[in-house]
Image: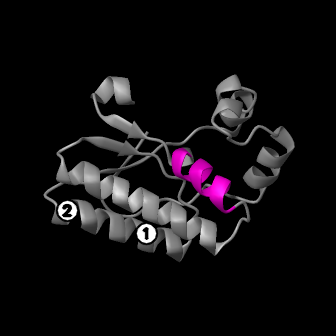
Amino acid sequence: MGRRTGFKVFHNHLTQDLAKELYPAFDETRFGLVEELRLVTVKYAAEHGTDLIHTFAHSGSSADDKFLDVMIDAVEQRGGRVRLVQLTASHDDLTARIANPSRQRFHKLTDSAILQEKLAAGVWLPSLDGNQTHL
């Protein structure tokens, strides 16, 4: 998407990887740092007129809703605009991509069994309301 739009891509895993190095536990301390890193980066980009694609896997939780509201507000306060885009893929496409070598390089999920469990449980299915585009 970055090549198509000319926007810089801020991959969500970058903040996860950094926070995980400092706080390995899957807990609020780690997630708090992730949110702070993401927010300061988005604010900085907005202040400097940098067009940015920020990847984000919305879990459907109210915490994710709140984070998006805070992030959108921060960008708009700095004269920027936010457009939410929901990317979707079929289960077959997701399963086919799980073995892609780039997933290991970026510390993403690479276990097909875990992916199937998450898909069966309906993880990653929420639809965002409001100003969005589906691709």
What segment is highlighted magenta in the picture? 14-23
Viewer-side residue, 63 vs 22: 22
Residue ID for mark 2: 76
Q: Secondary structure at mark 2?
A: helix
The residue sitting at 59% across, 38% down in the picture is: 89
Q: Quadrant of residue 124?
A: bottom right
Q: Quadrant of residue 118?
A: bottom right
The residue sitting at 26% across, 49% down in the picture is: 45
Q: Does the stretch in magenta take in 19? A: yes
In the image, residue 38 lies at what x, y percent? 43, 57
Whether 108 is drawn above or below 117: the answer is above
Mark 1 neighbour class, 10 Å CA radius: few under 14, some 14 to 19, many 20 or more: some
Amino acid type, residue under disc 2 in the picture: Glu
The residue sitting at 58% across, 51% down in the picture is: 18
- Residue 67 - label: 1
Q: CA distance from mark 2 to mark 1?
A: 14 Å
The residue sitting at 70% across, 39% down in the picture is: 91
Q: Does the stretch in magenta take in 135? A: no
Q: Quadrant of residue 99?
A: top right
Viewer-side residue, 29 vs 109: 29
Quadrant the N terminus occupies: top left
Whether 3 is drawn above or below 21: the answer is above
In the image, residue 34 lies at what x, y percent? 52, 61
Amino acid type, residue under disc 1 in the picture: Phe
In the image, residue 131 lies at what x, y percent? 30, 58
In the image, residue 26 lies at what x, y percent? 71, 65
